[in-house]
Amino acid sequence: MKILLIRHTEQEYPQNSEGKQLVAVRTTPLSETGIRQAHELAKRIGDMKLTPDALFGSPYVRTHQTATIIKEELQIPVLEEMEDLGEVDPNDSEGHTLEELNFIGSDVYAHPFGPNQESLEHLVVRLRKAFGKIYETAQKRGFKTIGIVSHGDPLAAMYWAIRNEGVPESYAEMKKDYYPQKGEALEFIYNKGSILRDSKRITIN
């Protein structure tokens, strides 16, 4: 089965009273640039003849918008949303600035902003289970190519979990082999617990 891991495109960041960009929340939409990028990514996927039979996506607004544009552009008949594909949650960095997040290298697991932060272990286990459910559903319904539309950390966690048992020792280890940029897709062939060939990154300008 061909798998496309797709990160949402550029978002419209909220700002605080000082005009500083804040960490995105569930309702953060795509920016005008992000909408254009989503159309470009859909065209790129179509030109490469990788149109999915179905999309599975995070229900967050920015991922829903990205997935919907791809679905409509490529006339994909199925789009199913799953909470387990959502962003890190709880995410105690919400309400903090991107400057603060960048200062800790985005590693909210080793340097949480509060006591409720989702752990790295929970994130990886959650995304491993989500991929298992998606793969089982795709097999039962005869899908040959599927797209999974989510966020940076969840997609990195999913890809790590597909290739490894247990949980990574650190955030850096999880990101080492793969961390998607916004509007990027990763395509690979997967069958019965293993990746059958090297992954291919699909990017836009």
Image (cartoon, rainbow, N blue to C red):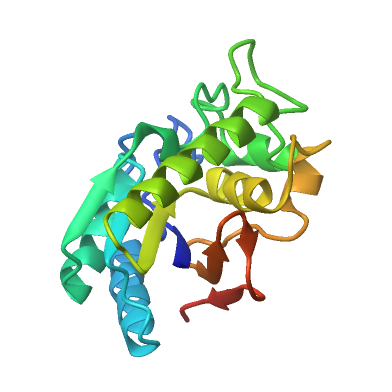
Q: Which residue sits furthest right?
A: 169
Depth check: 154 or 167 in front?
A: 167
Q: Tell me the residue at 37%/75% (across/down).
A: 41
**Toward which corner of the image does residue 8 lie, by quadrant?**
bottom left
Q: Which residue sits furthest bottom?
A: 47
Q: Tell me the residue at 31%/64% (across/down).
A: 143
The relative height of residue 205 versus residue 176 in the rendered view (above or below) is below
The relative height of residue 68 versus residue 73 in the rendered view (above or below) is above
Depth check: 119 or 162 in front?
A: 162
Is 170 positioned to the left or the right of 21 in the image? right
Q: How many marks?
A: 0
Q: Which residue sits furthest top?
A: 115
Q: Tell me the residue at 64%/60% (across/down).
A: 194
Q: Position of residue 9 (x, y in %)?
A: 40, 60
The relative height of residue 170 versus residue 146 in the rendered view (above or below) is above
**Toward which corner of the image does residue 99 lie, by quadrant?**
top right
Q: Position of residue 66 (x, y in %)?
A: 30, 58
Q: Position of residue 172 (x, y in %)?
A: 79, 46
* Quadrant of the image containing the N terminus: bottom left
- Residue 187 shows up from this direction: yes
**Toward which corner of the image does residue 108 lie, by quadrant?**
top right
Q: Position of residue 36 (x, y in %)?
A: 30, 71
Depth check: 164 or 69 in front?
A: 164
Depth check: 204 or 167 in front?
A: 167
- Residue 183 shows up from this direction: no
